[in-house]
Image (tube, rainbow, N blue to C red):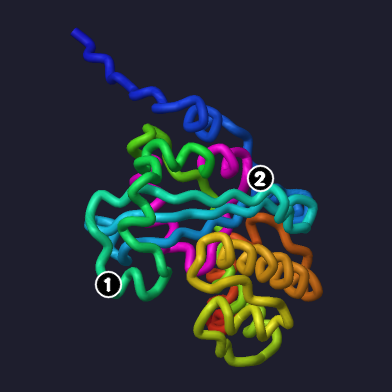
């Protein structure tokens, strides 16, 4: 007797749309792709014990930041926020008392991410929290995922310079861009979006850029920094 495996259906209409939407292929020139820059504010950096308390997302179309379509939201905390966390982002436990729980709050974020390539600064932080939240919605975090820090490191290598920016704000200033309200999800998302467009534009002056080339910035940087031996 054959045993059939039951596949859990996405938990919401937004999750189902996200799971089945077409995302730009790796060959797509970056200016023709649709991106979504995401920033999260967290109660800490351990996804096993900490949680998302606020989020923001900014779409990018045709190489332009669509700030008017940005979204911002709060998520109700399951546990009281630690003082060191509050000192960073200024969000207190009481500020989240009327916010919806994460499974409800996350729906607008899932909707705006649908059909778009995800972009974040130091992306492993966002993905380590987003992935389990999406799994609870019975969907997987879509790839590719672009990291503005990795793009900045690649640009530094292309220019023959040492990468010196230690924060998103420093990176933005080094590119001549404004810094929007640090440690606030919407402010950081807007800053990251502008940084992404600037970095992709600068990298395009060295070679045509596609979704794949930007997603593989770390590999390209490693190849440029440590070229293969002629004898290898």
Q: Main secondary structure of the magenta part?
A: helix
Q: Position of residue 181 (x, y in %)?
A: 57, 71
Q: Is residue 112 magenta?
A: yes
Q: Residue furthest top?
A: 1
Image quarter hosting the N terminus: top left
Kindly state the secondary structure of the residue where label 1 is placed: helix
Relative side of 60 to 133, left or right: right
Q: Is residue 81 magenta?
A: no
**Residue 28 can be seen in this image:** no
Q: Is residue 111 above or below residue 30?
A: above
**Between residues 142 and 173, which one lies in front from this camera angle?**
173
Q: Position of residue 148 (x, y in %)?
A: 58, 69
Tag nearer the camera, 2 or 1 = 1
The stretch of residues the image draws in magenta is: 110-134
The structure residue drawn at horizontal position 71% and vertical position 55%, both measured from the top left corner, is 67
Would you name the residue on which mark 1 appears?
A: 83
Q: Is residue 86 above or below residue 172?
A: above
The structure residue drawn at horizontal position 65% and vertical position 63%, both measured from the top left corner, is 193
Q: Residue furthest left?
A: 1
Q: Quadrant of residue 177?
A: bottom right
How crowded is the residue under tag 1: few (<14 C-alpha within 10 Å), some, or many (20+)? few
Relative side of 154 to 143, left or right: right
CB under 8 Å between callouts 2 and 1?
A: no
Return the mark for residue 40.
none
Kindly state the secondary structure of the residue where label 2 is placed: loop
Relative side of 168 to 94, left or right: right
Q: Position of residue 100 (x, y in %)?
A: 39, 41
Relative side of 202 to 133, left or right: right
Would you name the residue on which mark 2 appears?
A: 25
Q: Position of residue 34 (x, y in %)?
A: 69, 48
Q: Is residue 137 above or below residue 66?
A: above
How many discs appear? 2
């Amino acid at each position: 007797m054959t045993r059939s495996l039951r596949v859990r259906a996405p938990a919401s209409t937004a999750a189902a749309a996200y799971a089945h939407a077409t995302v730009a292929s790796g060959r797509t020139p970056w200016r023709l792709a649709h991106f979504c820059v995401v920033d999260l504010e967290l109660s800490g950096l351990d996804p096993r014990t900490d949680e998302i308390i606020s989020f923001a997302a900014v779409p990018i179309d045709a190489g332009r930041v669509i700030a008017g379509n940005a979204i911002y939201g709060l998520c109700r905390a399951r546990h009281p926020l630690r003082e060191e966390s509050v000192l960073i982002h200024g969000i207190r436990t009481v500020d989240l008392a009327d916010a919806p729980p994460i499974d409800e709050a996350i729906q607008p974020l899932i909707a705006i991410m649908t059909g778009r390539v995800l972009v974040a600064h130091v992306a492993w932080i966002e993905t380590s929290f987003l992935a389990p939240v999406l799994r609870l919605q019975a969907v997987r975090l879509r790839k590719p995922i672009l990291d503005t820090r990795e793009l900045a490191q690649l640009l530094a290598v292309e220019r023959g310079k040492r990468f010196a920016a230690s924060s998103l704000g420093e990176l933005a200033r080094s590119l001549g861009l404004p810094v929007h309200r640090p440690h606030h999800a919407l402010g950081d998302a807007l800053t990251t979006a502008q940084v992404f467009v600037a970095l992709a534009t600068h990298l395009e002056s060295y070679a045509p850029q596609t979704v794949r080339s930007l997603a593989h910035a770390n590999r390209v940087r490693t190849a440029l920094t440590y070229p293969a031996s002629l004898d290898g």
